[in-house]
Image (spheres, rainbow, N blue to C red):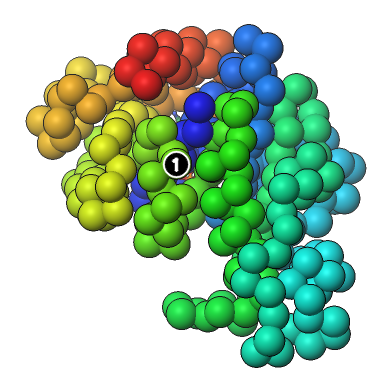
Amino acid sequence: MKIAITGKGGVGKTTFAAILSRLYAAEGFRVLAVDADPDANLALALGFPEEIIAGIVPIAEMKEMIAERTNTPGDSFSKMFKLNPQVDDIPDKYCTRYNGVNLLTMGTVENGGSGCVCPEHVLLKRLTSHLVLHNKDVVVMDMEAGIEHLGRGTAQGVNAFIVVVEPGARSLQTYHKIKKLAADIGVKKVYVVGNKIKDQADKDYVLANVDPDACLGFITYSQNVVHSDRADRSPYADSQVVDEVKAIKDKLSALI
Ligand SMILES: Nc1ncnc2c1ncn2[C@@H]1O[C@H](COP(=O)(O)OP(=O)(O)O)[C@@H](O)[C@H]1O
Ligand SMILES: [Mg+2]
């Protein structure tokens, strides 16, 4: 099962991805959590200790490994590099494990920009595609806002996109944008999770603005989640929120 968590910035993608990953791990699945957001913070939300986080090197920053795989010794701007670098051993070799969750941090390509084709970019893209197309376990990808960076082939390997929204107009606009993009690249299953819900009116607002069949459920606005974020702790400690995510997970399992 491969799930990509998307949505507008700040809606709760990382919070949801972390709790979902922990729940799958608690059920005995082999979970690969992928932090595909350049502004990586999934490790903290998963509850990884500071000393482990300090040692995590994002894939994009592994210069030597990238040079070796893409055949670009010492010259990352070389125009002659392998477009099909070997990546199959990377998930096992470079992920960090804690609480039963294997975490892979992708990082960002500094000199990126749209249309950038550098060895780092090629490797990340191929790795993403490999994770999605060849992994038999549960893969939970915490994406950066938007899905433009997902290639058609890779996106089709994702079983479901889950768009996290808040009960507000802007995050719902993002949902509609993502839904359209997903359809353009052939992804049919696009679900919604309403987060930071304070009352029935919030639920009604979300339901009125999405395809109601696509809604997997709601997560309450929780002061515990706010506090855990401020204290750099995992939101997995909030039992009500965890139960809500569990219900969402069970509904998802029934659909894919
Ligand atoms: N259910 C919730 N209740 C209260 N605060 C929440 C909830 N979900 C997320 N947050 C808070 O919202 C902020 C953004 O969450 P985050 O998961 O980092 O969003 P994203 O990954 O989409 O940018 C964080 O401060 C987080 O603690
Ligand atoms: Mg995030």
Residue under the point 60% across and 44% down:
131
Residue under the point 80% across and 33% down:
97
- Provide the residue designation for mark 1: 157
Q: Is mark 1 within 8 Å of ligand 2?
A: no
Q: Is residue 108 visible?
A: yes
- Check the image and report above or below for 2 versus 255: below
Q: Amino acid at mark 1?
A: Gly
Q: Is residue 120 left or right of residue 15?
A: right
Most extreme residue toward the left, as rendered? 208
Q: Horizontal and vertical percent for residue 159?
A: 41, 33
Q: Is residue 218 left or right of residue 83?
A: left
Residue under the point 62% across and 26% down:
137
Q: Quadrant of residue 164?
A: top left
Tally of numbered discs: 1
Residue under the point 60% across and 48% down:
130
Q: Is residue 45 visible?
A: no
- Check the image and report above or below for 66 versus 54: below
Q: Horizontal and vertical percent for residue 60?
A: 71, 64
- Where, quadrant-wise, is the C terminus in this rendering? top left
Query: In the structure shown, which secondary structural element does the residue marked by tag 1 occupy?
Result: loop
Q: Is residue 209 left or right of residue 66?
A: left
Question: Between 227 and 129, which is closer to the camera in this rendering?
Answer: 129
Question: Between 77 and 37, which is closer to the camera in this rendering?
Answer: 77
Q: Is residue 156 left or right of residue 214?
A: right
Q: Horizontal and vertical percent for residue 210?
A: 16, 34
